[in-house]
Image (tube, rainbow, N blue to C red):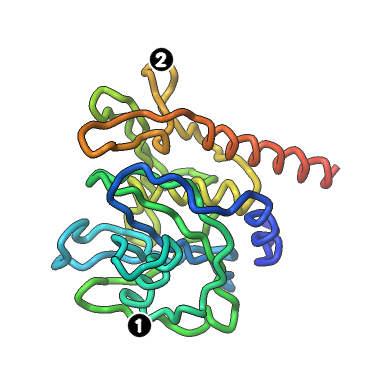
Amino acid sequence: MAQVSLAAVASRLKARESCQHEPVSVKHAAVLVPLFIDPLDGLSVLLTKRSSTVGSHQGEVCLPGGKRDPSDADDVATALREAWEELGTPLDAVQVITLLPPVLSKHFLSVTPVVGIVPPARAAHAPCPSPSEVEAVFHAPLSLFVDGGASHTYQDITWEQHAYRIHSFDHAGFKIWGLTAGILIQVAQLALGRAPAFMEHAPPELGGIMYGCFRYDGHRLQVRGNAENSHHNQEVQEQDVAESNSRN
């Protein structure tokens, strides 16, 4: 498999507009998607397994992140602060490249993925996880989230009668699923410039919608339009065509 350079990844991610997107709930949160080059696995993402003593998502695999503090200026500030608190990652160790549209968590948080690159010199330093928040730190190759294969499973479920697909990936003894898996599928498509080898969304006959279309107005679950997600899918398709042409 051809190795992907951080410069190429940054170029692909910067090709899309990076801005503060409209939140999908009145409760704001952000996660950092730290990308780096692993000598064996190539382009990879750093992940954590949460401690069994934290207030929510105990023992689950997550991206570094959490709720916005009053002192946080924006989603980038939230993501970088949480990475520092959870992993000891210095605020200047990550080059923030882009923000993806927020997704709604099962606790009705508007979660904005902040995608960043960790340069090789910084990636060489081992994280210093906070034992009160983090039980384990590991990485996974980003290609896992578009290649699928035997490690990938899914389940079509409903949220207040709206059908959507939950993905799960097994890697190195860890289960990466739900919101985290959904975010990484989106990031992998953009960073690698190719669509997943599996069906990302529940089929139309089930009335399936994109998970990113959910929003919460403080009283009830709503479904927003597909405009942002359709634009994302078009970006990936255009990248696929362009790279295919360059190889021919």
Residue 203 percent across, percent down from the top left: 43, 22
Answer few, some or many: residues within 10 Å of disc 1's Cα (few below 14, many 20 plus, some between 14 and 19).
Answer: some
Answer few, some or many: residues within 10 Å of disc 2's Cα (few below 14, many 20 plus, some between 14 and 19).
Answer: few
Frontmost residue, 57 versus 113:
113
| Amino acid under disc 1 | Cys
Q: Is residue 60 left or right of residue 196?
A: left
The answer to whether the residues at label 1 and label 2 have Cβ atoms under 8 Å apart is no
Vertical placement of residue 40 versus 199, above or below: below
| Amino acid under disc 2 | Glu
Residue 157 percent across, percent down from the top left: 28, 30
Vertical placement of residue 55 versus 163, above or below: below
Q: Is residue 44 left or right of residue 152?
A: right
Frontmost residue, 43 versus 19:
19
Vertical placement of residue 241 versus 18, above or below: above
Q: Is residue 240 left or right of residue 53?
A: right
Question: Is disc 2 placed on a helix, strand or loop?
Answer: helix
Which of the 4 quarters of the picture holds residue 210?
Answer: top left
User: Which residue is the site of mark 2?
Assistant: 205
User: Which residue is the site of mark 1?
Assistant: 128
Which residue is at a point 36% across and 28% down the rendered structure image? 223
Which residue is at a point 57% across and 46% down the rendered structure image? 189
